[in-house]
Amino acid sequence: MLTILFLITFAFASAKTIIVGKDEVVTSLRKAVELARPNDSILLKQGTYREGNIVINKSISLIGIGNPILDGENKYEILTVSGNNILIKGIHFENSGYSSMNDFASVDLIDAHNVVIENNIVEHAYFAIHVANSTYCTISNNHITGTPKTEQTSGNGIHLWKCDHLTVINNTISGHRDGIYFEFVTNSTISGNISYQNIRYGLHFMFSNNDSYIENVFRDNGAGVAVMYSNHVHMIGNTFDQNWGPSAYGILLKEISDATIEKNKFTKNTVGILMESTNRINASKNEFRSNGWAMRIQASCDGNEIHHNNFIGNTFDVATNGTMMLNKFYNNYWDKYEGYDLNKDQLGDVPFHPVSMYSMVIEQNSNALLLLRSFIVSLLDKTEKAIPSLTPEQLVDEKPLMKPLRL
């Protein structure tokens, strides 16, 4: 034991710091990386460095002093990182190259373990931070701004592929194709990020299981957030705001199972939640306010439970494209509810059917939206409430809340 402790102490004691700057002995970052030994630190002083693609494959720390700029000159991937126990901090990356064949990035992390990328600025990147086949890495407190063009010519802000146990926390991302992209990523957490004004999705999940995204803000993205072909995803305390457009939503859930959607806020989206082939989702303590549709649940969904949510000021609370409903709604607050509570237990005595006849018509013919708020539509809905016939009989909240929940 004493021998192991001595070896560890010796390794850290022998580590050195290499200072890079125009007035220093070492003026090139590339030269500093060549000179560095495991556990060394490189301090990169303020200035602009144009050195093409730099590869780090040693256990070292690269720390910027005064946000030095690494400029890719619109030609190069700037930093390629591979290995274990590496820190990249305080660097300003700009103008990484574009390639239709390769995923050039400002920071490309490949086959890595225990790498931290924090407190960096990334501007005008194709992919900002690209991570592949890596484990136990952290991406935190980075400010990422892209130059949006088209989906085909823009990369993602933070792109993760085939990773495990990664943490993406407190980053700000805008101007990319997808703000954050997960594919084949497991046991990972996305927390406290702000993803806004991206061309397509603020967050995009594909084939990624046992992950959580918590207390993030997804605002004004082209389509919203998409979670596809995954299971056991926990979506808690997020804000989905102002994702407007003909194919936009707060969240799209496609072929998702055994997930949790809790304590989220869906405000001013075309659709709050769109579910397709989604099973065994527990959606509770969410607030749906001022959306076009709060929820659209396709007939292919089964075994989902929607309970203890607030539905306030939405044009349509719930819509579906089928007559059979295999999901449960209970104990939600609906501002359109007109029932009563004779026994004062705070639960309505009259069941509430959240699907209007007009919303069923729109599912069959979207052009019927032209009649929104017309007298004939009001008459149809009143008639349907009095004599239900066309709306799904099983889609009903038997005991709606009389007052909104404090969320």
Image (cartoon, rainbow, N blue to C red):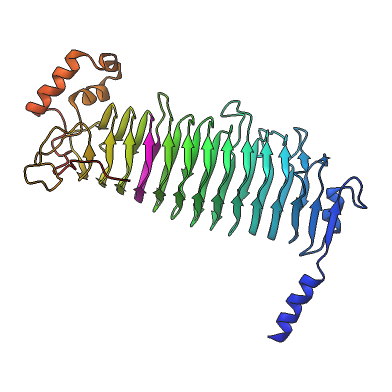
Q: Which residues are magenta?
A: 250-269
Q: Main secondary structure of the magenta part?
A: strand
Q: Position of residue 73 (x, y in %)?
A: 78, 33
Q: Horizontal placement of 317 versus 26: left or right?
A: left
For this orientation, the residue located farthest to the bottom is 2
Q: Horizontal placement of 216 versus 64: left or right?
A: left
In depth, the one of 89 and 134 nearer the eye is 89
In depth, the one of 112 and 342 nearer the eye is 342
Where, by quadrant of the figure, is residue 69 drawn?
A: top right
Question: Residue at the spot x=50%, y=49% of the render?
Answer: 191
Q: Horizontal placement of 98 versus 171: left or right?
A: right
Q: Position of residue 71 (x, y in %)?
A: 77, 38
Where, by quadrant of the figure, is residue 383 drawn?
A: top left
Above or below, comparing residue 231 to residue 367 in the picture: below
Above or below, comparing residue 61 to residue 261 in the picture: below
- Is residue 57 among what the camera can see? no
In depth, the one of 125 and 285 nearer the eye is 285
Q: Position of residue 385 (x, y in %)?
A: 11, 28
Question: Residue at the spot x=42%, y=43% of the render?
Answer: 228
Question: Residue at the spot x=47%, y=40% of the render?
Answer: 217
Question: Residue at the spot x=27%, y=43% of the render?
Answer: 309
Q: Position of residue 198 (x, y in %)?
A: 54, 32
Quadrant for the N terminus, please: bottom right
Q: Does 255 appear in magenta? A: yes
